[in-house]
Image (cartoon, helix red, strand yellow):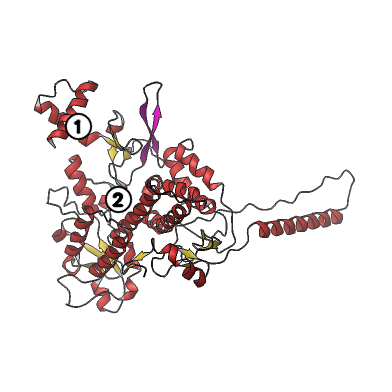
Amino acid sequence: AGKLADEVARIAVAKGVLRDASREEDLARFLRVVCVNAHTIPRIQGIMLFYWLSMFSHSCAPNATYSTDLSGGGLACIVARPRALQHIAAGEIISVTYLSLQMLLSPRGARQELLRVQKGFVCACGRCSGPDEIRVLPCPTCRAAGRDSLCFPAASAGSCSAGLPLTMTGAVSDMRWSCRSCGEIEADRLPLECEERLLGFLLGFDPPDEQTVHSLRAVISADLMTDGPGSVAGSCVSPSTMLPLTAHFLFAWLQLILVRLLLRRVEAPASKDSGENGACAARAAAALRPLQAWVALRAPNCLYLLAVEFAVPAVRGLLRGGRAEEAGQLAASFEAQLAAAYGHRHPDVRFLGDASACRRCYGGPPQSSESGGAACEGTSWVASCDACGVLLATQGVPAGSAQAAPTTATTPALTKTTTATTATTTATTIAATTAATTTKTTAATAATTPALPQACWCARCGLAPYCSPGCEVAGRAAHRALCVSSEGLLP
């Protein structure tokens, strides 16, 4: 820490922002100013201090953001451009977020504690004051009655602002929990201490590979599916509660870590095989879609951060791997959110727009979503068989992966006539022209957008698509290096 502080002081003096680095009180004040007000700039992999931007308030559900662009002549500089994420009324506070994507997908207590330690305040934004619905746990009361229901922390009662000590998930003893079915329940009947330990572990642990992520998912499932010390010993969650339990923020964290690991492999300098890169990027896209749905439902203001950190690199990897169709659909599902945050002229937005032009509409059941991504009417997500490369329509894609867009009605092209005709003749001509145009359009659409065969996913990792069980067996040798589950690598 001493060497780092000396280096920072040397740079500050050289840049003229600190007069005398030997005065410890001046250096300490300078470091506090930077720590509290600086913003992380991924483009330069560092932090920067902006005068006006540092005056914006924080919110865990911000109504504004900013993008950074290189500007200037010989000496390049970084220009921050603020932009509203939604309509901001006169007199309303303009807020950005001081937190990373992972912390924005964290529970209320974790966000408040981090801001208290790093920035010196306890957040009381609308998201921190309302129910904490990303911490859903099975309700022990409903389970005892033979029902499956989920409970979550109720709206904040203001204990944080009163100066009570916080844990990373909130003051456990003072937390009020509510069930959607039976109302309020006692906190000591829930596995909150176990949840606390898991959160603390994940905050300081960087899984080295996919196998570790799958193993952690199994551990977290087992730990969160047990009752707290105040419940009957030996009781556990029924298997039917397993699917709703994926609404818990720890599952979103693991999905985020999994996507990051896959993209790290795609972007590794030693990775030269375009086919292998494309397969890794496709796995990252498959893992990204349920995370996109999770964020769209529970933290929609964070979708643009998901696009910047994960969607843009995944699209690049898919394009480098020769998977333009998959890249186009993934780009289309994130383009609107990124454009709203950064503007249509931003390089990443233009890149997603160019990539989305490669996609085509294929027949299939319509997809619906809260995410706001663009897609074609009746579109199914496409994937390439890992063994033979044939295009497939994916199964089991959660809501949020695509957004149906309204179709444009077909307008018949009528030939102008200079001679007078009767009403009957005109009606007949219009009907015939419309029928012919509709028939031709339908035939052309069927020819260019055929219904794709459905994909079957790898039985172990669930991230590799195949067109048939035979292709899965044939592609196992190439897939072995990638396929992992809680049981380990493929034999």
Q: Residue at x 32, y 40 (%)?
A: 96
Is residue 125 visible in this depiction of the protein?
A: yes
Pick whichever, 42 or 465, lies toward us.
465
As for residue 74 lying within the magenta part, the answer is yes
Q: Amino acid at mark 1?
A: Val
The secondary structure making up most of the magenta span is strand
User: Badge 2 is on which residue?
Assistant: 102
Where does the magenta region start and end?
Answer: 63-84
Q: Amino acid at mark 2?
A: Gln
Q: Is residue 23 left or right of residue 432?
A: left
Q: Is residue 322 left or right of residue 189?
A: right
Pick whichever, 331 or 11, lies toward us.
11
As for residue 239 lying within the magenta part, the answer is no
User: Based on the displayed image, in which of its 4 quarters is residue 226 positioned?
Assistant: bottom left
The disc at residue 33 is 1
Question: Residue 159 location, x and y as percent?
Answer: 16, 52
